[in-house]
């Protein structure tokens, strides 16, 4: 693997680290910048209509859903493949914990799964997420298993 390819993979890892940090600290404008303008997001494993197209719609959807919650998102074991000079795809194992306002918390959500993503490098060299699909292996609401069903 070339030095340039290794540098691109590291840049994508840094991009995803920013995604998690900015999401959990609710820095919505900066968080939106990790996506391309025309990005797509599919988190329908979390809620049936949780899809958005375009950076602004993604920020509106996610900030509206988790903006008041204390969240902690972890990404692990990235599998990143460069698919072209300015494109890549990746899979990240993930775990998240969300506590919605209340005393005790009104709702505690815990989940595990995988992010399936596509990335694009802009002309200025910045990598961004072009598409994100979250596939849940486990989702619990208030300690009750929601996924897998059954």
Image (cartoon, grey):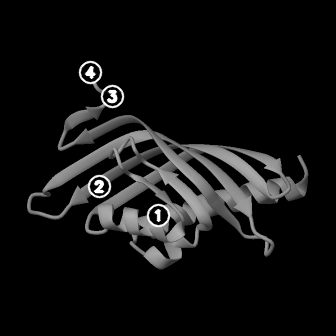
Measured from the top left, where is residue 124 in percent x and y? 79, 75
Residue, disc 2: 98
For the point 36% across and 68% down, which residue is it? 63
Spatial CA span between label 1 and label 2 = 19 Å
Q: Of the two numbered discs 1 and 3 on the same chain, state the one appearing first in sequence.
A: 1
Image quarter hosting the C terminus = top left
Residue placed at 80% from the left, 46% from the top? 83
- Closer to the chain start, of discs 2 and 4, is 2
Q: Nearer the viewer, mark 1 or mark 3?
A: 1
Q: Residue 84: percent from the left, percent from the top?
A: 84, 50
**Left or right of 103 in this view: 41:** right
Q: Is residue 41 above or below residue 92?
A: below
Residue bearing mark 4: 150
Q: Are marks 2 and 4 in contact (CB under 8 Å)?
A: no
**Disc assigned to residue 58:** 1
Mark 1 in CB contact with mark 4 (< 8 angstroms): no
Q: Is residue 14 left or right of residue 46?
A: right
Q: Is 38 positioned to the left or the right of 95 in the image?
A: right
Residue sitting at the far left: 103
Residue beneath label 3, please? 148
Q: Depth-wise, is mark 1 or mark 4 nearer the camera?
A: 1
- Relative to the observer, which residue lies in front, 60 or 137? 60
Of labels 2 and 3, the one closer to you: 3
Q: Nearer the viewer, mark 1 or mark 2?
A: 1
At x 38%, y 49%, the residue is 96
* Callouts 3 and 4 close, C-beta under 8 Å: yes
Q: CA distance from mark 2 to mark 3?
A: 18 Å
**CA–CA distance in space, label 1 to label 4:** 30 Å
Q: Residue at x 26, y 68 (%)?
A: 68
Q: Nearer the viewer, residue 76 or 114?
A: 114
Contact between labelled residues 2 and 1, with CB atoms less than 8 Å apart:
no
81 relative to 13, above or below = above
């Amino acid at each position: 693997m070339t030095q340039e390819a290794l540098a691109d993979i590291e840049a994508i890892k840094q991009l995803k680290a920013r995604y998690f940090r900015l999401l959990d600290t609710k820095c919505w404008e900066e968080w939106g910048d990790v996506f391309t303008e025309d990005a797509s997001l599919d988190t329908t494993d979390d809620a049936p209509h949780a899809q958005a197209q375009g950076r602004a719609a993604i920020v509106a959807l996610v900030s509206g859903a988790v903006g008041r919650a204390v969240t902690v998102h972890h990404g692990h074991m990235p599998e990143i493949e460069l698919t072209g000079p300015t494109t890549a795809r990746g899979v990240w194992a993930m775990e998240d914990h969300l506590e919605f306002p209340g005393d005790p918390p009104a709702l505690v959500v815990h989940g595990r799964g995988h992010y399936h993503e596509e990335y694009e490098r802009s002309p200025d060299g910045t990598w961004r997420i072009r598409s994100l699909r979250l596939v849940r292996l486990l989702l619990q609401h208030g300690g009750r298993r929601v996924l897998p069903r059954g």
